[in-house]
Image (spheres, helix red, strand yellow):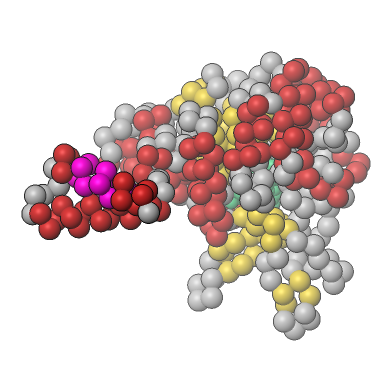
């Protein structure tokens, strides 16, 4: 690599900003070790709770949306729950991974029922294994909300604040709150998590969706015994929505730590999340569909973007595109100013330009 892809986030050094996102890529220690061996900077493990006996998955639980002409997967829907592996197995896995890979980052994704005791107990037990950070799953959109978990918490800012505070009270390591995109204003639960003491925010989790109806049977997909529930949508189709949510949260909270995700498949996709304020980037569906080997392409693409812009490291790219978001009125003023400046034939020197924008903005504001 021509550039240094390492980055320090909440005091943790990542050798590169890429982590497989919580989901099938982080199912157990064996596959997590494989991702580390292939060069991922860290891993967010599959979400687990203290009582796996309540987690019952269905089959099938995935469905794909493909391009009309190409066979490419555009969008991916899942109705998968959190991990159904026993809690003790997860504690062993975390201990073993931190022993064998001390230089790699392990983020434990946890979820619990809505009681202070349970959230604080899982936090205490998991942090003893030596994991580097927590990601609080306050955002799984399917299945768990029926038990008042996941998105049922994440869509209510007061619960987000409360749960984050419970964890913050006992956690000695950084805490990221993973946010749901299934809200009108993502900045509201994000602000609540920060009030509760979150050190960072992860976004987005999946988008509630119905991926399609089989027109032969009129059954929605994925179909379990002829029936279905809305599931969580991910993959390339969600990227523009994820970028927008990351941008809004970053603009509302300058300097906040963001782990961005949603439809990332290349280093160029990832660079866009970083330019909008993310300092790490997670890849879940991309790693499922293309394999952990994707990490080489991710690093090469990001390295190329940094090189093209003469940037020495990833930190220099963080948030670089944020100043270019503005209001519609300002766009109109800028456009009018550009036309006025062109008419004057005065070129685009800064004084004329700023003067023209100020005049146009004043005119718009007075309307
Ligand atoms: C099959 C599947 C299972 C997932 N399981 C979890 C989970 O256990 N916990 C969690 O926080 N997010 C989970 N997610 C959401 C992803 O971590 C990620 O937020 C989302 O899919 C968007 O990123 P992507 O387009 O790179 O997949 C899952 C996603 C998929 C596709």
- In the displayed structure, does residue 33 sit left or right of residue 312? right
> Going by the image, does 326 lie left or right of 113?
left
Q: Quadrant of residue 59?
A: bottom right
Is residue 247 part of the magenta span, yes or no?
A: no
In percent of the image, x 30 and y 32: which residue is there?
Answer: 311
Q: Which secondary structure dominates the residues rendered in magenta?
A: helix
Residue 8 screen position, x and y as percent: 49, 23
How many discs appear?
0
Q: Residue furthest right?
A: 53
Q: Which residue lies at the image location 75% right of the left edge and 61% below the top edge?
A: 230
Q: Report the front residue among 198 and 70.
A: 198
- How far across and down, in percent of the image, does residue 134 sit? 68, 28
Left or right placement of residue 230 versus residue 240 in this view: right
The answer to whether 212 is drawn above or below residue 183 in the figure is below
- x%, y% of residue 98? 66, 22
Compared to 218, does 85 lie above or below? Answer: above
Query: x%, y% of residue 316?
Result: 36, 30
Q: Is residue 196 above or below residue 64?
A: above
| Closest to the observer, 188 or 91 | 188
Residue at the extreme bottom:
216
In the picture as drawn, the residue positioned furthest to the front comes out as 366
Is 357 colored magenta in this rendering? yes
- When the figure is inspected, residue 210 is found, relative to residue 25, above or below; the finding is below
Taking depth in this image into account, of 229 and 193 the one nearest to the observer is: 193
Please report the bounds of the magenta region as a residue range: 353-361
Q: Confirm whether residue 188 shows in the render.
A: yes
């Amino acid at each position: 690599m021509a550039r240094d892809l390492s980055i320090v986030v909440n005091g943790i050094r990542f050798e590169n900003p890429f982590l497989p996102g919580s989901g099938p890529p982080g199912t157990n220690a064996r596959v997590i070790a494989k991702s580390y061996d292939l060069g991922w900077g860290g891993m967010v493990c599959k979400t687990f709770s203290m009582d796996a006996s309540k987690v019952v998955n269905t089959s099938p639980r995935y469905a794909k949306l493909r391009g009309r002409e190409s066979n490419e997967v555009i969008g991916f829907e899942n109705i998968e729950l959190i991990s159904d592996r026993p809690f003790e197995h997860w504690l062993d896995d975390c201990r073993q991974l931190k022993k064998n890979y001390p230089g790699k980052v392990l983020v434990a994704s946890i979820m619990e029922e809505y009681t202070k005791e349970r959230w604080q107990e899982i936090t205490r037990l998991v942090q003893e294994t030596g994991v580097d950070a927590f990601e609080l799953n306050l955002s799984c959109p399917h299945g768990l909300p029926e038990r008042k978990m996941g998105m049922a918490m994440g869509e209510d800012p007061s619960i987000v604040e409360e749960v984050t505070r419970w964890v913050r009270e006992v956690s000695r390591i950084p805490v990221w709150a993973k946010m749901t995109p299934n809200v009108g204003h993502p900045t509201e639960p994000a602000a609540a998590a920060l009030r509760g003491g979150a050190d960072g925010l992860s976004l987005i989790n999946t988008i509630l969706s119905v991926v399609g109806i089989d027109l032969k049977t009129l059954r929605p997909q994925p179909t379990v015994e002829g029936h279905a529930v809305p599931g969580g949508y991910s993959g390339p189709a969600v990227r523009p929505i994820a970028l927008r949510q990351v941008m809004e949260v970053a603009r509302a909270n300058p300097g906040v730590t963001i782990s961005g995700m949603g439809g990332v498949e290349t280093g160029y996709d990832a660079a866009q999340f970083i330019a909008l304020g993310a300092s790490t980037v997670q890849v879940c569906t991309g790693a499922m569909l293309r394999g952990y080997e994707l990490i080489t392409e991710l690093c090469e693409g990001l390295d190329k973007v940094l090189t093209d812009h003469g940037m020495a490291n990833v930190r220099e790219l963080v948030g670089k595109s944020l100043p270019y978001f503005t209001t519609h009125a300002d766009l109109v003023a800028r456009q009018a100013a550009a036309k006025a400046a062109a008419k004057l034939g005065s070129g685009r020197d800064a004084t004329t330009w700023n003067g023209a924008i100020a005049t146009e903005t004043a005119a718009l504001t007075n309307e």
